[in-house]
Amino acid sequence: MAEPVAASRYSPLIILALVAALVVTIGLWARDRAGGAVATGGGTTAHAAGEAIEWKMITTWPKNFPGLGLAAENVARAVEEMSDGRLTIKVYGAGEIVPALEVFDAVSQGVVDAGHGAAYYWKGKVPSSVFFTSVPFGMNAQEMNGWLHYGGGLALWREAYAPFNLVPFAGGSTGVQMAGWFDKEINSVEDLKGLKMRIPGLAGEVFTYAGGTAVRIAGGELYTSMQTGVIDALEWVGPYNDLAFGFQEVADYYYYPGWHEPGAMLEFIVNGDSYAALPDDLKAIVEYASRAINQDMLDEYTARNNASLRSLIDDHGVQLRRLPDDVLKALWEGTKQALQQLVAEDEMAAKVYASYREFYRGARSYHHISEQAYINVRDEVFGEEEY
Ligand code: CA
């Protein structure tokens, strides 16, 4: 057992070494305060405090597209304002630097510093990514935000993206989406047979289990694909975004509910080296700005969806329909199969699913007596009356 070292046993040489270390430490601290560079490790060239930094951010959306397309611009503005211009982010739409579905690779490889898109687009590379966007019959926006920020979801997301040198942040939620646009009525599960639908993520596989064919197409190509008959159906977002895309011109039937994306969460991704090179205050600004813009998107959809739906129906003659129960049942059966296969094939997906499922069970249980109970009760007490 080692004896405690008494002060009297310190040799003059050790005292000299301690003093020297103290001097070096104070010197480094003073240089930091004066704006000197501090290496953050990993071979990253760190930015000096006060140095103006410019990032490039690419998106999977057309430039300046309403709703989800504006999140990149919004986070860029928030970061610039909060940092007093020390960090500026120039935003590029889909196709300006790389095509929409190459955003993940371009940010991972450091072609650009950051990106905005949806995690489930990268399902082929990161199977667990579907849980960070939306899974069929899964959590709504409120529950997703709770899981990511207080239930361990974001930490798992960062773990899943770490091998790609990417740091993800929640990038805005659309809330419950619409089931999508169809060129014919869907009256039973038989009507899904042979139907070609643009529907990404795990829902695409579910749709295939239910008899349809899932097609992967970026948002900017959807209108033409539907118009030319490449696809028979598509899902995009909800009334506010879909009206702006003009899908009412190429399809007659608009279906709900959004079984496939009940709380679709988008993502900001930052290249790991670009992020590590930021001084701590700018890292915090990126974190808080993305958190604010994440919530801002849900607020905007909540404010605008109803007026857009009224316009689709009243001004454009769109036929609003609910998916039949047997279709929803078939899609739920497909969801169970797709989830089972996903977790059997990928260890990280199994780990994320375990966390997601546990949180969802708790949230759903509590919502029976909170959100859900209240929404049911207000319909009952209002009857035909309005508030
Ligand atoms: Ca969607």
Image (cartoon, grey):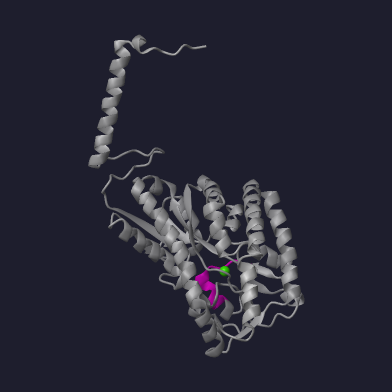
Give whichever of 298, 317 is nearer the camera: 298
> x, y percentage for residue 35?
25, 42
Seen as rendered, the residue at the extreme front is: 381
- On the rendered structure, is 29 left or right of 367? left
Regarding residue 146, the answer to whether it shows in the image is yes
Q: Which residues are magenta?
A: 215-225
In magenta segment, residue 98:
no
Give whichever of 1, 74 is nearer the camera: 1
The structure residue drawn at horizontal position 63% and vertical position 78%, both measured from the top left corner, is: 379
- On the rendered structure, is 286 left or right of 105? left
The structure residue drawn at horizontal position 27% and vertical position 22%, both measured from the top left corner, is: 20
The structure residue drawn at horizontal position 52% and vertical position 11%, both measured from the top left corner, is: 1
- On the rendered structure, is 243 left or right of 63? right
Q: If the picture is divided into quarters, which one holds ligand 1?
A: bottom right
Regarding residue 193, the answer to whether it shows in the image is no
In magenta segment, residue 217:
yes
Q: Quadrant of residue 19?
A: top left
- On the rendered structure, is 189 left or right of 154? right
